[in-house]
C-alpha cells in the first residue's frame, strides 16, 4: 500500500506542477536594472513590451534601486500625462512583483521626479486566452505580437475551466495525503 500511495502522491505533485507551470515571471526590460530612463529617446521599455507576450496569471518583475526609484501603476490618463500624484498602486521595494490578474492594458510609470517625462514608462497589454489567435487591437503604442504557434496551444483548452481546477485541487488534496 505504501508504494501505491507514493505513486499517487508523485502523480498529484506532477499535476500541481503541470497546473501552475504555465504562469511566467517576466523581468521588465529583459534584464536587471532596465527600469531607468532610456538611453535613447526611442522607447526601449515599450519596445521590449511589444516583443513580449503577456498572459493572465503571469508576473512582471522589476529590479531597481528602491532608494532612488519606484514603480507606479497608473491610469491611462496619468500614464500619458506622467501624473504621479494618485497612483493605483505604488511599489518602492526595489524588487517589485506584480501579478497580471486580468486581460487588457496595464500602465506603469516611474515615481522618480522627471523620469516618466524622459520616457521611463511602460504599457503592456495582457491577452486573454480567448483572444490568443485574434488579439484585440492593442493600444497604438504597442505593436501586436505575432501569434506564436507551439505545442502548448494543443493542451490549452484542456487547462481551461473545470478540468483544470478539478485536477489542480485533486492534486493538492492528494499531495497532502
Ligand atoms: C540611438 O538611436 C539612434 C537612431 O535610432 C541609433 O543610431 C543609436 O545607435 C542609438 N544609440 C544607442 C546608445 O542605442
Ligand atoms: C494629476 O492628477 C490629479 C488627481 O487625479 C489631478 O488633481 C491633477 O490636476 C493632475 N495633475 C496634472 C498636472 O495633470
Image (cartoon, helix red, strand yellow):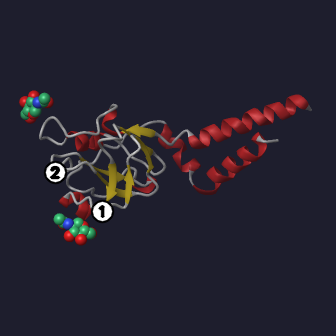
Tag 1 secondary structure: loop
Tell me which numbered mark, 2 or 1, is placed earlier along the sequence. Answer: 1
Which quadrant holds the C terminus?
A: top right
Residue that sits furthest to the top in the current view: 3
From the viewer's perspective, is 65 left or right of 161? left
The residue that label 2 is drawn on is 117
Considering only vertical position in the picture, is 107 above or below 6?
Answer: below
How far apart marks 2 and 1 lie (CA) works out to 16 Å
Q: Is residue 135 visible?
A: no
Q: Position of residue 45 (x, y in %)?
A: 25, 41
Q: Position of residue 61 (x, y in %)?
A: 41, 41
Q: Where is residue 149 in the image (x, y as percent from the top left)?
A: 40, 39
Quadrant of res 1? top right
In the image, 22 versus 26, the foreground residue is: 26
Residue pictured at 15% horizontal, 46% vertical: 118
In the image, 113 versus 34, the foreground residue is: 113
Q: How crowded is mark 1: few (under 14 residues within 10 Å), some or many (20 or more)?
A: some
The residue that label 1 is drawn on is 75
**Where ligand 2 lies, by image quadrant?**
bottom left
Ligand 2 lies under 8 Å from the Cβ of mark 1:
no
Amino acid at each position: 500500500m505504501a508504494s501505491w500511495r507514493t505513486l499517487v502522491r508523485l502523480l498529484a505533485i506532477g499535476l500541481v506542477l503541470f497546473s501552475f507551470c504555465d504562469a511566467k515571471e517576466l523581468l521588465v526590460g529583459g534584464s536587471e536594472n532596465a527600469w531607468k530612463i532610456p538611453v535613447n529617446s526611442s522607447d526601449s521599455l515599450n519596445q521590449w513590451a511589444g516583443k513580449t507576450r503577456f498572459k493572465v496569471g503571469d508576473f512582471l518583475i522589476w529590479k531597481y534601486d528602491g532608494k532612488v526609484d519606484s514603480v507606479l501603476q497608473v491610469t491611462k490618463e496619468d500614464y500619458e500625462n506622467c501624473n504621479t500624484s494618485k497612483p493605483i498602486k505604488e511599489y518602492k521595494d526595489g524588487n517589485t512583483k506584480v501579478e497580471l490578474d486580468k486581460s487588457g492594458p496595464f500602465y506603469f510609470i516611474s515615481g522618480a521626479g522627471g523620469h516618466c517625462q524622459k520616457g521611463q514608462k511602460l504599457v503592456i497589454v495582457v491577452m486573454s486566452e480567448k483572444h490568443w489567435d485574434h488579439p484585440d487591437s492593442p493600444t497604438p503604442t504597442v505593436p501586436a505580437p505575432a501569434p506564436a504557434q507551439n505545442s502548448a496551444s494543443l493542451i490549452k483548452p484542456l487547462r481551461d475551466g473545470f478540468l483544470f481546477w478539478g485536477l489542480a485541487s485533486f492534486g493538492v488534496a492528494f499531495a497532502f495525503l
